[in-house]
Image (cartoon, grey):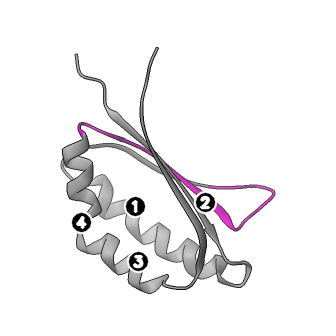
Amino acid sequence: MKKPLTIVARIEAKKDSVDLVKSELLKLIAPTRKERGCLQYDLHQDNDHPEVFLFYENWESRELWQTHMKNAHLQAYTKATDGAVMNFTLNEMIQID
């Protein structure tokens, strides 16, 4: 049985842009959860460093996740947060146990 693709995306907003980035990230949740292949799409915010956000995602396949990455709502997020994100790290992972 093929295991799902796990994505861990860490977004660090600039200190003066936390509210903007958070509001734009929240807009991604509903449409993404409706996408074909999306098994899990959860947003987290660090308790001690509110500028740090993390998406924990599970997708049926890498191909379906790549389709997600090209969707209009992600392009809108990128445009709306241009210059507001200090750091972005994305890890593609597979569960090994």
Q: Which x, y percent locates residue 62?
A: 25, 42
Task: Find disc 2 in the rendering and name its residue.
Answer: 53
From the viewer's perspective, tell me whether residue 65 is left or right of residue 95: left
Quote the CA–CA distance across marks 1 and 4: 15 Å
Upstream in sequence: badge 2 or badge 3: 2
| 23 up-or-down from 53: above or below | below
- Please, what is the three-letter code of the amino acid marked with disc 1? Ile
Image-quadrant location for residue 77? bottom left
Q: Which residue is mark 3?
A: 78
Q: What segment is highlighted magenta in the picture?
A: 45-61
Judge whether residue 49 is colored magenta: yes
Q: Who's the residue at 56% across and 76% down the image?
A: 21
Looking at this view, is 51 or 63 the one in front?
63
* Residue beneath the point at 39% across and 66% down: 28
- Viewer-side label of 1, 2: 2
Q: Which residue is mark 1?
A: 29
Residue 25 rendering spot, x and y as whole percentages: 48, 68
Residue drawn at (23%, 38%) of the image = 61
Mark 4 highlights which residue?
Answer: 70
Q: What is the quadrant of the N terminus in the image?
A: top left
Label 1, secondary structure: give it: helix
Q: Are marks 1 and 3 in contact (CB under 8 Å)?
A: no
> Dots 2 and 4: beta carbons under 8 Å?
no
At mark 3, the secondary structure is helix
The amino acid on which the numbered mark 3 sits, given as a three-letter code, is Thr
Mark 2 residue type:
Phe
Residue 87 % position (x, y): 60, 67
Camera-near label (1 vs 4) is 4
